Image: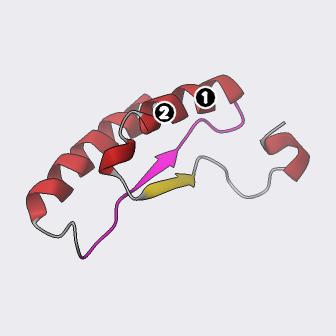
């Protein structure tokens, strides 16, 4: 999760310097797997960058989790 936050910062810096902000969008990917504490911490960090990304996506899941276990 911490690595994803550092990666987002690098991506934001590159995106802003690329001159393509009007042609491409950058989304923050919320990580943390099924650990609610890590997801909350990651989301807090992503929200700090809300003015520099187009939106958010959920990451860190393999797709085989039971729906009731993901966001309870």
Q: Quadrant of residue 46?
A: top left
Estimate the x, y position of residue 48 in percent, counting from the top left: 39, 33
Asked if the magenta segment contains residue 27, the reply would be yes
The residue shown at (53%, 35%) is 43
- In the rendered structure, the answer to whether residue 44 lies left or right of residue 61 reads left
- The residue that disc 2 covers is 1
The residue shown at (22%, 72%) is 22
Magenta stretch: helix, strand or loop mostly: loop
Estimate the x, y position of residue 20 in percent, counting from the top left: 17, 70
Estimate the x, y position of residue 54 in percent, counting from the top left: 39, 59
- Farthest residue, direction front: 51
The residue shown at (45%, 37%) is 47
Vertical relation: 55 (above or below) 8: below
Q: Quadrant of residue 2?
A: top left
Around disc 1, counting alpha carbons within 10 Å, would you say few (fewer than 14), some (14 to 19), or many (20 or more)?
A: some
Estimate the x, y position of residue 56 in percent, counting from the top left: 50, 53
Q: How is the image coloured?
A: secondary structure
Q: Earlier in the sequence, mark 2 or mark 1?
A: 2
- In the rendered structure, the answer to whether residue 46 lies left or right of residue 68 reads left
Region in magenta: 23-35
Vertical relation: 64 (above or below) 71: below
Q: CA distance from mark 2 to mark 1?
A: 11 Å
Q: Quadrant of residue 34?
A: top right
- The residue that disc 1 covers is 40
Helix, strand or loop under label 2: loop
Identify which residue, 25 or 60, lies in the foreground.
25
Q: Quadrant of the C terminus?
A: top right
């Amino acid at each position: 999760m911490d690595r994803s936050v550092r990666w987002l910062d690098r991506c934001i810096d590159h995106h802003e310097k690329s001159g393509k902000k009007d042609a491409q969008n950058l989304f923050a990917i919320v990580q943390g797997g099924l650990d609610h504490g890590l997801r909350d911490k990651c989301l807090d960090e992503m929200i700090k960058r809300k003015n520099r990304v187009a939106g958010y996506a959920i990451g860190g899941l393999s797709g085989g989790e039971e729906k009731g276990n993901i966001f309870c």
